[in-house]
Image (cartoon, grey):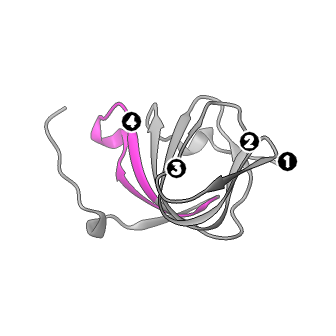
Amino acid sequence: MPALIRRLEDTPGVDCPCGVARRILTAADGAVLSVHRVSIREDSRTHYHRRLTETYYVLEGEGVMELDGIGHPLRPGTVVHIPPGVRHRAVGRLEVLNMVVPPFDPDDEFESEV
C-alpha cells in the first residue's frame, strides 16, 4: 500500500447504527484497518459484528457504552475495545474515533434486540 493522506473535511458522512460515520480510511484503500470518525446520536441502535473488532476512542462528549447490556461511562480520552460478538451501542451525544480490524465491512453489521 502506498502512503496515503486523507482529511476529515473531504470525507462524506454515511448513516450507520450509531449515527453518522465519516470513513476516512477503508478497505478500498488497501489498509489493514479502517478509521472512522463517528458522530454518535442519542438513539444509536444495538448491533454486533461476527468478524470485526472495533476500538472506540472518545474525542468529545459524555455518555454510556452498553456492552452486552451493561453500561460503562464514556468521556473524552476513554478507549473501548469491542471484540466480535459483543452487542454494543453508545448512548449520548459523542464524537469518537473508531478503528476497525479487519477493515469495516457493512455485511458484518447485525442489529440486535438486546
- Residue 6 falls left or right of residue 48: left
Residue under circle 2? 87
Tag 1 and tag 2, C-beta contact below 8 Å: yes
Foreground residue among 95 and 51: 95
Tell me which segment is drawn in magenta. Answer: 18-37
Task: Locate residue 58, reporting x and y percent.
Answer: 49, 55
**Disc sitting over residue 114 in the figure:** 1
Label 3 CA crowd tier, 10 Å (few <14, some 14–19, many 20+): some
Numbered disc 4: secondary structure: loop
Q: Amino acid at mark 4?
A: Leu
Residue under circle 4? 33
Task: Locate residue 9, reporting x and y percent.
Answer: 28, 70
Q: Amino acid at mark 2?
A: Arg
Indicate whether residue 29 is drawn in magenta. yes
Numbered disc 2: secondary structure: loop
Q: Look at discs 1 and 3 and give the one toward the viewer.
A: 3
The quarter in which the N terminus is drawn is: top left
In primary-sequence order, the first of circles 4 and 3 is 4
Foreground residue among 30 and 19: 19
**Disc sitting over residue 39 in the figure:** none
CA distance for labels 4 and 2: 20 Å
